[in-house]
Every structure is written in structure tokens, then in C-alpha cells.
Image (spheres, helix red, strand yellow):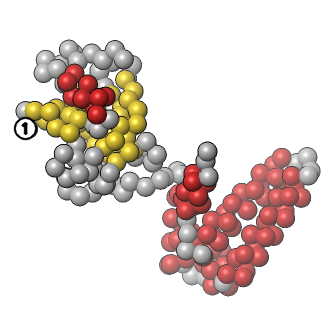
Amino acid sequence: MNIDFSKNTDGLIPAIIQDSETKTVLMLGFMNAEAYQKTIDTKKVTFYSRTKQRLWTKGEESGNFLNLIDIKNDCDNDTLLIQVKPEGPTCHKGTDTCWADENKADYGFISNLEDTIQLRRENADSEKSYVASLFKLGMNKIAQKVGEEAIEVVIEAKDDNDDLFLSESADLLFHYLILLQAKGFKLNDVVEILKSRQK
């Protein structure tokens, strides 16, 4: 890997630290050539501490190591993206990230939809909210809706109307997310089981 440590007069380049699974950015540190080599050799992320004026392996005092998974160099060869498996919180203040964000899987729109479902369940008027009305009707009704939507997906899968197939698939996924929450789970709980089956 061709890394240009000479671009800055202090010989340091930024190293962006990202969780390899959740893709959450955990922190920003700085490396010189020696810190980079120690990271490669030990598989534990090591920085050059500008405060301590020495090499500093993240976790050397707290035990919250950043285990190296992968390193990528940017297009100008002067910034690293380092993917890690963190052991414990990354920030010295005890938070998952140095921006106090929670390090959890984020499925974009689907995660936002799960949050909306939870808000409707907790706060919405069941007379005005379809989601709240389903939760009020209870588990049997929610499970029934999932079954109905699954049958619709199967029917449309055997037809030639792709628009209807996708529409029914969206209905099934939406109601399945509701069912998961009715059972006390989120999509990530299912994802973790799928990961455990990966060979």
C-alpha cells in the first residue's frame, strides 16, 4: 500500500475508524509510519498521540481495543479508512463513538420505518393510526395480517404483474416489521440469526 506520510510536515495522516459490521464511524485518529506498521503487526489499531507525543494503542489502558479487519487508502494516498471490530466503547468518555452515537446496525429506510412503527405503537391514536389500531387489536390480528399478505405475495409471484408482486411484497414486509415489534424484536434480531448460519 502506497501511503504518503510526507504530505504533512509532522508525518501524520488521518485515520478514520469504522466498525466493519455496522459501518458506523467510531473515531478519528492520526498515524505516522511507525503507528501504521505496529497496527499491521499486532492487528490492534495504534495511533500517534499528539498529546502524549508517542505511539498509543487504543485500549492499552481501558482494554477497549480496536481489532484490525481491513485498511483502505484514499485516492490521494494520505487518508486511511480502517475497518475494525471494537472491544467495548471507543470513546474515552464511555460512548460507542466519539460523537456519542450508538454503534448499532442501521438499515437506512427500514430502520426509520421501524422507528415510526414504534412511535405509532407508543403514542398514536388507534382511531387515526393504522399501525396503532393493529397493536390495539392484538397479536392474533397482526399475525393474521402477515399470513394474508404472504398469501398475496405467493399469488402475485405466479402472475406476470411485477408491480403487483412488488406492492404485495412491500405490504408483507411492513406487516412483518409490525409483527416483530409485537413479539418484542427488531429486524436486526433476525439478521443476527442469519449471520450465525453463514458458513
Q: Quadrant of the C terminus?
A: top right
Q: Residue at left 21%, top 28%?
A: 35
SS for callout 1: loop
Residue 117 against residue 68 in the figure, above or below: below
Position of residue 124 relative to residue 154, above or below, is below
Q: Quadrant of residue 179?
A: bottom right
Res. 147 image quadrant: bottom right
Toward the right, the furthest residue is 159
Residue type marked 1: Lys
Q: Is residue 49 left or right of residue 118?
A: left
On the image, the x and y values in percent for residue 84 come to 37, 41
Q: Position of residue 100 (x, y in %)?
A: 28, 55
What residue is disc 1 on?
Answer: 52
Instruction: Identify the residue shown where x is 53% and y is 51%.
Output: 107
Location of residue 24 with respect to 116 vertically, above or below: above
Say whether residue 121 is visible.
yes
Vertically, is 112 above or below 136? above
- Measuring from the top left, give residue 155's x and y in whole percent: 89, 58
**Is there any visible trace of residue 99 in the rendered image?**
no
Tell whether 81 sits left or right of 37.
right
Residue at 81% in and 49% down: 163
Name, please, the residue furthest toward the left. Answer: 52
Q: Quadrant of the N terminus?
A: top left
Return the residue nearer the eye: 164 or 88: 88
